[in-house]
Amino acid sequence: MTADKHLQSWQERFEMAEAMQPLLGKLYRNQGVEVVLYGKPLLNASTIEIIKSHRLVRRHVGDKLRLRESFPFVEALSKLAVKQCKVDIGKLAINYWREHSDASQVEAYMSQALASAIDYDDNQQSRDVVLYGFGRIGRLLARLLIERTGVSNKLCLRAIVLRGGRKGDLEKRASLLRRDSVHGPFNGSVEVDEENNAIIANGTYIQVIYANSPDEIDYTKYGINDALVVDNTGIWKDEAGLGLHLKSNGATKVLLTAPAKGAIKNIVYGVNENDILDEDTIVSAASCTTNAITPVLKAVNDKYGIVNGHVETIHSYTNDQNLIDNYHSADRRGRSAPLNMVITETGAAKAVSKALPVLEGKLTGNAIRVPTPNVSMAIISLNLNGETNKQDMNEYLRNVALCSELQNQVDFTESTEIVSSDLVGSRYAGVVDSQATIAEGNRTILYVWYDNEFGYSCQVVGVMQKMLGLHYQSLPVA
């Protein structure tokens, strides 16, 4: 009898999650509404992922949230004329059930909580995006942009630019988009149009352009205008080099997915994106490590004040290293990446001050490249102005992750078993590992995981939206 009870409960949850999926898809495709549950994206989530995200709620807030309690909120949301926003149904549902015993007032409650997004005057125009380069970050950006395909989508991936153009190149590029050894298969279909040099992914027509220099392309020939070019090659990092993109017809803004040199603004989304002005034509999204540590450092500095500190990065190896020992211009990086831990330099700690000037001159940093293909960790050792302990520090950072302006950048885990591979696909800039936190008096050491590929790519998308003047509300307001 007990076994039947558990099976029946599982069946009920499974069916409820299945019923949610088409509603979640329609909300995004038709209204531009992205539904999350305590920060966990439900768009394109499997039934099992939806169930698991509900189980995590209790760990976050102490209250259980059943699918039969959250489903009325998804249903009510699908009936409201809400547009262009991110809605956390987990927070809405928990707040509601703490004060109500039935679902009779859910729709009225939702209408009030989401009033600012109902009948939102969406006069934002769709904008063209070009990916210049199609490596690790380029392909993940393509996945993120393609998953947003729909009539309400404002970021339109129109083209990718590559060097070469040898026979078979197009199919090889499409194959790399279809399959990824780290991030798994592409969620959908990918076709190749050899005659027109294009890739069609989930209905998105992507022109493939071959060029040797950024300034030799006429994007308008392909119907691309006023485009944001996202340079993920890492070849050009200063204004002179990146400015070559702006000499191409149809390109008006450039975003670099690496730290920039000179006076170019380095932006960490969630921290200093408001520094981007309409007249800024070249912007950098900084590095994956800078994105991972800056939101956490901002949170800690806001509450305790940081006197000084050191950041040690345990970083997965990258394409910049060699598979086996070979020549490399940088110290140690010529040694085999899959076989060695390699001490190397990182400018991430110093680069924090470009996004958070209050920490200018306060941080040092180093990096150790390790034999894993993805997911890295930053160990942040800080001297503080104020005193704290492990419990207070963790409680504060948990609240930052759940209920602050940094909730989309900072995640928080209490798991005693989590390891790097568990964080592959994390959409957060960084994940605080609370079990490893050390804090006593005015000293603290924080361990922050980050998917240096996918999590960083999510941050880049945020900078893209800001550069193009695209605004999305996050509701309920933290």
Image: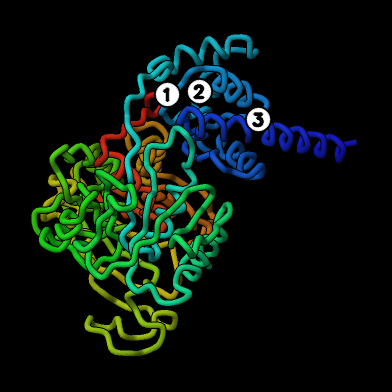
Q: Residue at x 68, y 31 (%)?
A: 19
**Residue located beneath label 1 in the image:** 476
C-beta proximity under 8 Å, tags 1 and 2: yes
Q: Give the residue at x 52% y 61%.
A: 192
The disc, 1 or 2, on the residue closer to the chain's N-terminal end is 2
Q: Amino acid at mark 1?
A: Pro
State how many labels appear. 3
Q: CA distance from mark 2 to mark 3?
A: 13 Å
Look at the image and tell me in which quarter the N terminus lies. Answer: top right
Tag 2: residue type?
Leu
- The residue that disc 3 covers is 67
Label 3 environment density (alpha carbons within 10 Å; few <14, some 14–19, many ≥20): some
Cα separation between marks 1 and 2: 7 Å
Residue 322 in the image: above or below residue 425: below
Q: Percent from the top left, x then y, of residue 458? A: 38, 48
Mark 2 highlights which residue?
92
- Residue 390 image label: none
**Image: 239 above or below 108:** below
Q: Is residue 425 left or right of residue 270?
A: right
> x%, y% of residue 173?
46, 67
Q: Residue 325 appears at what percent x and percent y?
A: 36, 89
Q: Please, which colouring scheme is shown?
A: rainbow
Q: Secondary structure at mark 2?
A: helix
Taking 99 as reference, is 161 above or below it?
Answer: below
Q: Are marks 1 and 3 in contact (CB under 8 Å)?
A: no
Tell me which numbered mark, 1 or 3, is placed earlier along the sequence. 3
Q: Return the residue nearer the eye: 274 or 118.
A: 118
Task: Check contact, mark 2 vs mark 3: CB within 8 A.
Answer: no
How many neighbours does mark 2 have within 10 angstroms: few (below 14), some (14-19), or many (20 or more)? many
Q: Say which label, 2 or 3, has the lower sequence index.
A: 3
